[in-house]
Image: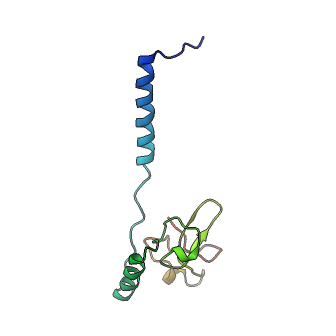
Amino acid sequence: MFKPARPRDAGRMGKACVLSLLLVVGCGGDPAPAATLDLAQAGDLATAADSGLKAFGEACAMDSECQSDACFLGGNRTFCSIKCTVATAATDCPVPPTTGTCNMQGYCKAP
């Protein structure tokens, strides 16, 4: 038969729940590393970053939010990406931060 928790146990259980939640939230993984850029690209991205635009891999809702002006709106994930073609993926999709491949919708894949 189920026995309800005593008041002193309820405090311990509450602390355990909060600690568990913090551990789960804190284990999200490392953010995607930055790509290697030449000086011209670095200058363009610095200007974009100063304007508050989002980097590759960050969540977005529309192209205008991203440094690359390319927001991938997927079924499971939505993130700032880079436009590409399968034929040009090797040059369009730098590793890191991308996987170096282009998806079937014309966006560089995130790791």
Query: Residue drawn 41% across and 24% down?
Result: 11
Query: Residue drawn 55% across and 70% down?
Result: 109
Quarter of the image with the N terminus is top right
What colouring style does the render use?
rainbow
Looking at the image, the residue that sits furthest to the bottom is 40
Of 15 and 105, which appears nearest the observer?
15
Vertically, is 37 above or below 27? below
Q: Quadrant of residue 41?
A: bottom left
Vertically, is 99 above or below 42? above
| Count of numbered circles on the image | 0
Looking at the image, the residue that sits furthest to the left is 39
Query: Residue drawn 45% across and 22% down?
Result: 10
Q: Residue 106: image x %, image y %? A: 62, 77
- Does 2 sit left or right of 47 as displayed? right
Of 13 and 75, which appears nearest the observer?
13
Q: Residue 74: image x %, image y %? A: 63, 65
Q: Residue 79: image x %, image y %? A: 54, 67
Query: Residue drawn 43% across and 19% down?
Result: 9
Asked if residue 37 shows in the view, the reply is no
Of 107 and 78, which appears nearest the observer?
78
Q: Residue 19: image x %, image y %? A: 40, 36
Asked if residue 34 shows in the view, the reply is yes
- Does 15 sit left or right of 60 as displayed? left
